[in-house]
Amino acid sequence: MSINRFNSLTQLNVSRETFERLECFVQLFQKWSKVINLAAPSTLEQVWQRHVIDSAQLFKLAPPQQHWLDLGSGGGFPGIITAILLAEQGDGWVDLVESNHKKAGFLRNALLETGGRGKVHPVRIEEAVALVPGCEIISARALAELDKLLEYGFVWVEPDKKVKFLLHKGRDYDAEIKKARGRWSFDLVIHPSVLEPDSVILEIQGLARIR
């Protein structure tokens, strides 16, 4: 095993079987990335650090065995990583929403090959509520500004105020929070990223529209 992969295994603190599932996913990701755009080309050589471990840190912030809804799943971060980590627990589920049919095809193949606990919905986010009527955690990565993400997720939060958001955000997160506060009230916990000093995970609950 290479030093990079050994370090990744140590950082993730997962079983050998789960690590092998993650390795399988990374190989699929790199293969499909040659055909369709799954992530920024500059990050493809750093998949473990930039994407896998970055995605896994969301999972560590959530209670076990949860029902996740991953919006704009794209290249599978964090949705497929979450599905693989849930497979280690043997419980929990991820509904992945991705309207791009090529990317949705990749996501389906990734779940099949890795045994991840999830299902892909190749529809627009606005159409997904009919297919996924409820969830406990909403995740998204590199999809939209916070205000827009809260708008997307509100349809699931409105009937169940306990639904929690776990969202990756970069260095402009403070400005996004201030903008979102103009339309929404919510409880917020800011978790520093384990990888990037300028990045955070926003944990949001109790979302309500104020105008």
Image (cartoon, rainbow, N blue to C red):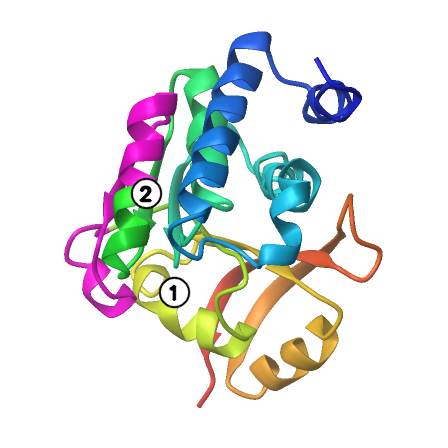
Please name the residue shown 70% across and 81% down the image: 175
Task: Tell me how many marks there are.
Answer: 2
Q: Check disc 2 and give the amino acid type.
A: Phe
Helix, strand or loop status at disc 2 = helix
- Residue 199 horizontal/vertical position (percent): 75, 59
- Is residue 65 visible in the rendered image? The answer is no
Q: Nearer the viewer, residue 129 or 196?
A: 196
- Whether residue 48 is situated above or below residue 171 in the rendered picture: above
- Whether residue 92 is situated above or below residue 18 in the rendered picture: below
Please report the bounds of the magenta region as a residue range: 107-133
- 207 magenta-colored: no
N-terminal of the pair, mark 2 or mark 1, is: 2
- Residue 200 horizontal/vertical position (percent): 72, 57
Q: Pointer 1: what residue?
A: 153
Lateral position of residue 179 relative to residue 120, left or right: right
Give neighbour class at mark 1: few <14, some 14-19, many 20+ (Cα, 10 Å).
many
- Residue 88 horizontal/vertical position (percent): 47, 16
Measured in 3D between alpha carbons, the distance from the residue under mark 2 to the one under mark 1, in whole angstroms, is: 24 Å
Lateral position of residue 62 relative to residue 37, left or right: right
Q: Pointer 2: what residue?
A: 106
Q: Quadrant of residue 156?
A: bottom left
Q: Nearer the viewer, residue 117 or 24?
A: 24
Helix, strand or loop status at disc 1 = helix
Lateral position of residue 37 relative to residue 130, left or right: right
Q: Quadrant of the C terminus?
A: bottom left
